Amino acid sequence: MLSKKSAVPFRGTKEQEEELLKVIEELKDEKGALMPIMQRAQDIYGYLPIEVQKIISDQTGIPLEKIYGVATFYAQFNLSPKGRYQISVCLGTACYVKGSGDIYNKLMEKLGIVGGECTPDGRFSLDACRCIGACGLAPVMTINEEVYGRLKVEDIDDILAKYE
């Protein structure tokens, strides 16, 4: 369960850890404190790597397995950092029937990561979404705020080259 290492090494700072420890101290005795602590931890670090989950566990006495379970159950939590360029491929019905699954697979192959991960250099992260409301442009992906529509697998290399 916890054996998979992120492709991006953890780079937390002493200042981030001190901020997290203050948050935990402030909230740990409140009923239902785990979710707010985890949300604040993600705000501090940008994601919830195992190193941060261990700090939360050590400081609150909540088993690491429970923290990991919450982190993987709720879609709002990220276990991997997000890249400078966040790619999201729509896998909603209109996009999927027009080939977005092939585009998603090509991106995983080209970037060397799977959905939810970040490239080791921190440049790209890849996620799937269900619908961005641009069905007329299907298949669609976004990179940060830029929308790319009517995509073909052959377009991927040229699009990624813009961000290198």
Image (tube, grey):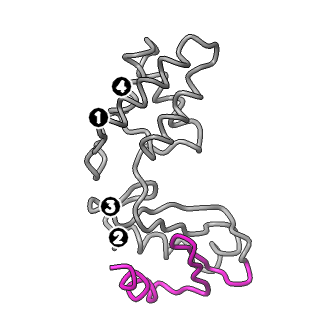
Q: Tell me the tag on residue 14.
A: 1
Asked if disc 1 and disc 4 are in contact, CB closer than 8 Å, the reply is: no
Q: Amino acid at mark 2?
A: Glu
SS at circle 3? loop
At x 47%, y 35%, the residue is: 41
What is the spatial separation of the Cα atoms under label 2 and label 4, in whole angstroms? 32 Å
**Magenta-colored span:** 135-164
What is the spatial separation of the Cα atoms under label 4 and label 3, in whole angstroms? 23 Å
Q: Which is nearer the eye, 129 or 10? A: 10
Please state which of the two labelled residues, at mark 2 or mark 1, is closer to the viewer. Answer: 1
Please state which of the two labelled residues, at mark 2 or mark 3, is closer to the viewer. Answer: 3
Asked if disc 2 and disc 3 are in contact, CB closer than 8 Å, the reply is: no
* Residue 46 percent coordinates (x, y): 45, 47
Looking at the image, is mark 2 or mark 3 earlier in the sequence?
Answer: 2
Looking at the image, is mark 1 or mark 3 earlier in the sequence?
Answer: 1
Let me know if residue 40 is in the magenta part. Answer: no
The residue at which mark 2 appears reads as: 109
The residue at which mark 3 appears reads as: 122
At x 61%, y 13%, the residue is: 30
At x 53%, y 27%, the residue is: 37
- Label 2 crowding class (10 Å Cα cut-off): few <14, some 14-19, many 20+? few
Looking at the image, is mark 1 or mark 4 earlier in the sequence?
Answer: 1
* Residue 5 percent coordinates (x, y): 28, 43
Q: Tell me the tag on residue 54.
A: 4
